[in-house]
Each structure stands twice: as C-alpha cells, then as structure tokens.
Image (cartoon, coloured by chain):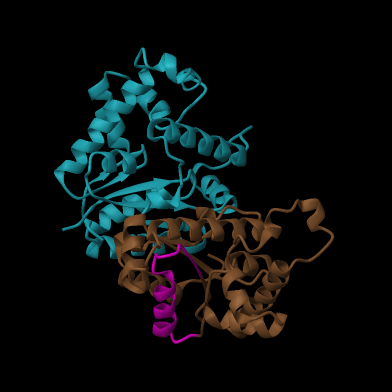
Chain colours: A cyan, B brown
Amino acid sequence: MLPVITISREFGSGGHSIAEAVAKRLDIPFYDGEIVTRAAVESGYAKELIEEQGEAATSANKWFDISAASAMYFQSPQDEIFLAQRKVILDCAKKGPCVVVGRCSDYILKNAEIPALNVLIHADMEHRQARVLERYGEIKNVDIKKRIIKKDKQRRTYYRYYTDQRWGEYRNYDISLDSGTLGEEMCVNLICELAKTWLPEG
Amino acid sequence: MLPVITISREFGSGGHSIAEAVAKRLDIPFYDGEIVTRAAVESGYAKELIEEQGEAATSANKWFDISAASAMYFQSPQDEIFLAQRKVILDCAKKGPCVVVGRCSDYILKNAEIPALNVLIHADMEHRQARVLERYGEIKNVDIKKRIIKKDKQRRTYYRYYTDQRWGEYRNYDISLDSGTLGEEMCVNLICELAKTWLPEG
C-alpha cells in the first residue's frame, strides 16, 4: 500500500508542483489549498485569513510575540486556525494514502502516530529566484530575494512555534532533496520510487 | 558520465557500507580508508594518528580549544593532517568519478569548484544503536549510545572548525536519506539512480 506523504518545502523550491506531480503519478489525493478550504469550514475563519496566516508567522499575527506565560490563558485566532488545519490534516491522512503539503504536517502526523513518508524540498537562492520570477513574473517594487527571505522566516517561525522544532532539521525527514541541482522531474521520480516500496517500519 | 559522489554520514547510520555498495554497483573507485593511507604518506604522520584525528575533534587534539588569534601563528598537527587529507581528496576527485566518504569532502570539493553529488546519510538513535551492536558486538564497559553521541560531537566539531558550517545543514546536500526508515538497500538504489542521470548544472 502507498504511504501518506508529507512534503515540506522552501518557498520557490517547486515543492508544491513536485507534490502535485507525485500525487498525480501515484493516483492518490493531493492536499494543499483544500486544507485551507476545509479549515475555513472547521474554524469559521475566512479562507483568505487562513491562506495568509495558516502557515506563516506574519506581522499581522502579533501573538507570536507574546510570552508563553500569557499564551497559556487564551487561544489566539492563530491557534484556532492551527487546530482546524491539524484536524483536517489528520482526517485526510486517516482516509488513506495521500500527499499533504506543509503546515507542520510531518510533526502533526508523527505526534498522532500516523506513519508517513516525510519529504523536504529545498533549493538555493538562485534557483528559487528564477523559479519565482518564472511563476509570478516581475512584480513592480517587489524585490524577489527579499520576499523569499521573508517567507522563509515566517514559515520557520510558525513551524518553531507549533512544533518546538527547528524547521529543515534533517532528522525530521526520510528524504531531503535539492530541487535546484536535481531538477523537479528527478525529485518526482525519486519520491515515487520510494513511495512504492516504502514500509513504515523501515 | 558518472559524478564524484561525497557521502557524509552519522556514526552507526551505515553510511560507509552504503557508500561502498554504491561504488561497487557503479563500478567506480571508493575512498575511505585509502584516504588515511595516502594522507599518511603525504603528511608523514602515522596512519593510526590520522585514523583517530583525521575526522574528529578528540580530547587528544587540544588545539580545538585555542583561540582563533593564536591559531593564526602556527599550524597544528591537526591542520597538517587536514591539509594532507584535503590534497588526497582533491587528487582522487580530479581523476574522475568516485565515491568519497566524510572528512569534509563536500566542502573541500565545493571550495575547489569541483562538481560533486553530495549525499547525507543519517538515522535515528535506535537504528544506529542496533547497527553498531550488530557490527561491533557488545563491548564491555562501553555504553553504545554514549559512544554514538560522542562520535557525533567530535565529527561536528571537526566539520565546524574546518568548514565554518553547521554539519548536517540540509542546504549542503543534494540528497539526504534516513537509512533507518528507508533501509540501506533503498538508499543504495536511490543514490545510484540519481548518479546515473545527474548533471552538475542541475
């Protein structure tokens, strides 16, 4: 049986496309934007808010600055969004083999003792800049490199906050791939080959 | 053409065996112990000393404690061993496709602008303990877990000292594999598949 696959990715690394291609080739469900839609229903928050804050510590979510002590006394909207997404991710994984993108899914599944093949996709700045430019085009007054660095920081802070782990720590992944040097197609091939023979007990 | 492959590995992860199997299957030279032998000739130091100190910051090499300022004024035996190993690694890589294990080889080749496929092999403590026990057997008065933790620390300190980089940082590897969850055979398969199609320009 195919596994549940989580794909963590750096912004601009092509991780989303790779995840989508893996799901398509293995013919299993793909969850990225759909997590947002379902979490909106779960939580009552707007899709746009979840999209913006459901994976990133942004300047809009000031609660990342508050102390742990005061955090004990209330549940922030950010926490509610995290919990709604968590529930959706667990529901999806329990249904069977699938590909889930980001949102601390590796941590969430491990914590729930649901076996998963955990993948990390990364690339160097040069490849990521080229990819973002190709995908979104030139945006007036937007420095692509600065945008990538900011996205990295937001995702890292979010991940650190909810998992108490360092994002990108090699121990948390079964396989980590540099999509810049290997190319997206090779990443898809390797993940699919692995998924077909992988057994959770190692 | 096949690439030069560097394999960095955690102690007890089976990285050495995986590297050897990859070299055998691809029919290219394998350099691990041979680096020690050749570096001994290069440097004039005994093989045993290089084996002990050529990859690890141990209590015997006190110079890891001295300040950067005083380090500027003399070259320690450790530095001489590093430079001898560096020369051997560069010589091997320049000859053509091969597999080189550890010794900062990823960093050394990148710095010399020699393209290489950089691989990291890691595993969780449980798998590593089982592997070390299987390979070396029970050793009286030796706590395997403590030995693994110490080896990790020594290699990390050595790597940090000579490369000014964090060991195990995902950005430094084209592919990182968990040999504990994936199994050694699968690691060999994935590396060989990658090596056959990999092009240094990505």
Tell me the residue at 23%/33% (across/down): A88
State the image coordinates of residue A117 (x, y, percent, origin top left). 29, 53
Q: Quick one: B134 or A144, which is closer to the camera? A: B134
Magenta stretch holds residue B103? no
Q: Residue furthest front?
A: B141
Q: Is residue B83 left or right of residue B173?
A: right
Image quadrant assignment for residue A37: top left
A81 is higher (above) or lower (below) than A125: above
A167 is higher (above) or lower (below) than A201: above
Tell me the residue at 61%/42% (across/down): A145
Magenta stretch holds residue B11? yes
Q: Residue furthest right?
A: B73
Q: Is residue B108 left or right of residue A7?
A: right
Q: Is residue B170 left or right of residue A107?
A: right
Q: Quadrant of the N terminus of chain A?
A: bottom left
Q: Is residue B124 visible?
A: no
State the image coordinates of residue A13 (x, y, percent, origin top left). 48, 50
Q: Quick one: B132 or B192, which is closer to the camera? A: B132
Q: Quadrant of the C terminus of chain A?
A: bottom left
Q: Quick one: A17 or A140, which is closer to the camera? A: A17
Q: Which residues are magenta?
A: B7-28
Q: Is residue A184 left or right of residue A94?
A: right
